[in-house]
Image (cartoon, rainbow, N blue to C red):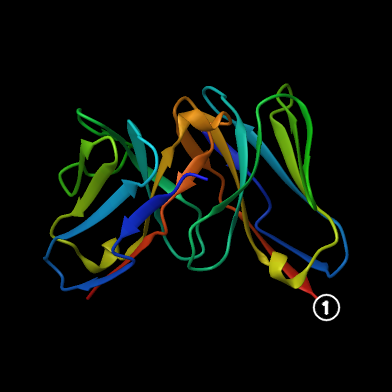
Amino acid sequence: GQNIDQPTEMTATEGAIVQINCTYQTSGFNGLFWYQQHAGEAPTFLSYNVLDGLEEKGRFSSFLSRSKGYSYLLLKELQMKDSASYLCAVLAGTALIFGKGTTLSVSS
Amino acid sequence: GAVVSQHPSWVICKSGTSVKIECRSLDFQATTMFWYRQFPKQSLMLMATSNEGSKATYEQGVEKDKFLINHASLTLSTLTVTSAHPEDSSFYICSARALAGGSGELFFGEGSRLTVL
């Protein structure tokens, strides 16, 4: 079966750094995605990892360890607008399977 | 970047009626599109994989006779919710992968919020 786990909720303050973890057990692996979703809107793409290591893109970085079935999304210099749901998703075969998402609340 | 357009964005219908949602890839061809459903405060659940020119592949627990999918062309897939009931009220999102993009990034439509009265 497919299983993707991430924390349900996290809180942080402006300017801080937060790490959102994701562990997965899937039949097949063709890459791991992170998406940001604001309430009532479609998800927007943040990052894609298919090889082990860290991918950095501005304030956001994503890490993957395939042997451990583990990824994290690192958000630096948090801003209020970063308050959203962050979805970890694994490309298993041709379909993208989503975790339940982590709701991040950023306070001033 | 690639664009996926979904229509309508909002739809309200009476119980028992059918609703059609369209998903178009505007600047690329998509042999495969995916339909997701998202209930409030929950993540996206894959409903089915829509294949151009062939039958859709449905996930376990999704009624194929209730959620009709037609992938008529390389740029259009439709989802029809037949005999809709209040429990079908949800956010329906389509997506497609632009393989030429290199990363295999999945692009999402804007979503369609269905409310069944």
Q: Nearer the viewer, residue B22 or A40?
A: B22
Question: Residue tagged by mark 1?
Answer: A108
Q: Residue A99: x and y, percent?
A: 56, 45
Q: Quadrant of residue B77?
A: top left
Q: Residues within 10 Å of mark 1 (few under 14, many from 20)?
A: few
Q: Nearer the viewer, residue A5 or B106?
A: B106
Q: Residue B33: x and y, percent?
A: 35, 38
Q: Residue B12: x and y, percent?
A: 24, 73
Label 1 secondary element: loop
| Left or right position of B15 against A79 | left
| Left or right position of A53 against B117 | right
Q: Quadrant of residue A13?
A: bottom right
Q: Residue at x 46, y 35 (%)?
A: B98
In the image, residue A10 above or below residue B37: below
Q: Residue at x 31, y 50 (%)?
A: B23
In the image, residue A96 above or below residue A99: above
Q: Quadrant of residue B35?
A: top left
Which chain is indicated by disc 1?
A
**Residue B43: in sight, yes or no?**
yes
Q: Residue B20: x and y, percent?
A: 19, 57
| Left or right position of B68 against B61 | left
Q: Amino acid at mark 1?
A: Ser
**Residue A1: in sight, yes or no?**
no
Number of numbered callouts drawn? 1
